[in-house]
Amino acid sequence: MECITSCLVRVLFRQLVTAGTVGDPLTDALAALRVDPWRQEVVTHISGCSSPARAALAESLANHVEHLRGLTPEFAPGWLPRTNDRVAIPLAGGRVVLHGVFDLLVGVPVTGVASLCAIGLTTGGSWDAARRALDYVVLLELLRSGTPPFRVALLHSGLGRVVVDDVVEAEVGAMVSQVAGRLYAMAASGE
């Protein structure tokens, strides 16, 4: 159920950032997913749920959205808020592609200047794993543009928690080491 909740909350987060409002969370999320051909299994699953299960899901989503309303500022258009920003970085002549998705990227890209803020969203699970995922997309932005974001924020919609940190070279270096280690292990195993 956590995966379904996460999928729904992410859709509602995008709606909150882009439209500034969410009506009925479950209705809004399902409406958004119905037009996404890759998310039909989520819509089908929820449609098959019992009334009590749907009511519990609706209550959970309302809780997440209430927290997100308190955690997410209204962004001026000049800040260029971009949700669901996908990044793909080919390495080794395209034999390896690192890819990830920013939940929210804010700021005007400036060549050679750290001018972006990366915002990650987690609905539950390990805070450390969510932070590592955010550090990974920070590395991808460095590879894409030559400059990492200057700041990151991680929102926990289930708890209403937010942590904001400056991006530091040591964390980026640690992520480079993790990715290099994983690539080395893949090469050694023949993946």
Image (tube, rainbow, N blue to C red):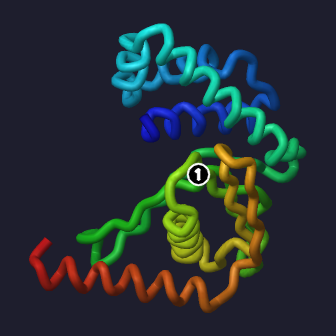
Q: Is residue 54 above or below residue 105?
A: above
Is there any visible trace of residue 137 in the rendered image? Answer: yes
Residue under the image location 75 percent in, 24 percent down = 22
Is there any visible trace of residue 144 in the rendered image? Answer: no
Residue under the image location 77 percent in, 29 percent down = 19
x then y, percent, for residue 65: 72, 33
Q: Which residue is mark 1?
A: 122
Image quadrant in which you'd find residue 141: bottom right
Q: Is residue 110 above or below residue 33?
A: below
Judging depth in this view, the residue of 87 and 72 nearest the camera is: 72
x then y, percent, for residue 30: 53, 18
Query: Looking at the image, which residue sits at the far top?
Result: 51
137 displayed left or right of 72: left
Q: Is residue 27 above or below residue 173?
A: above
Residue under the image location 34 percent in, 24 percent down = 41
x then y, percent, for residue 49: 40, 14
Mark 1 is surrounded, within 10 Å at the Cα level, by few (under 14), some (14 to 19) or many (20 or more) other residues, namely many
Q: Amino acid at mark 1?
A: Thr
126 displayed left or right of 119: left
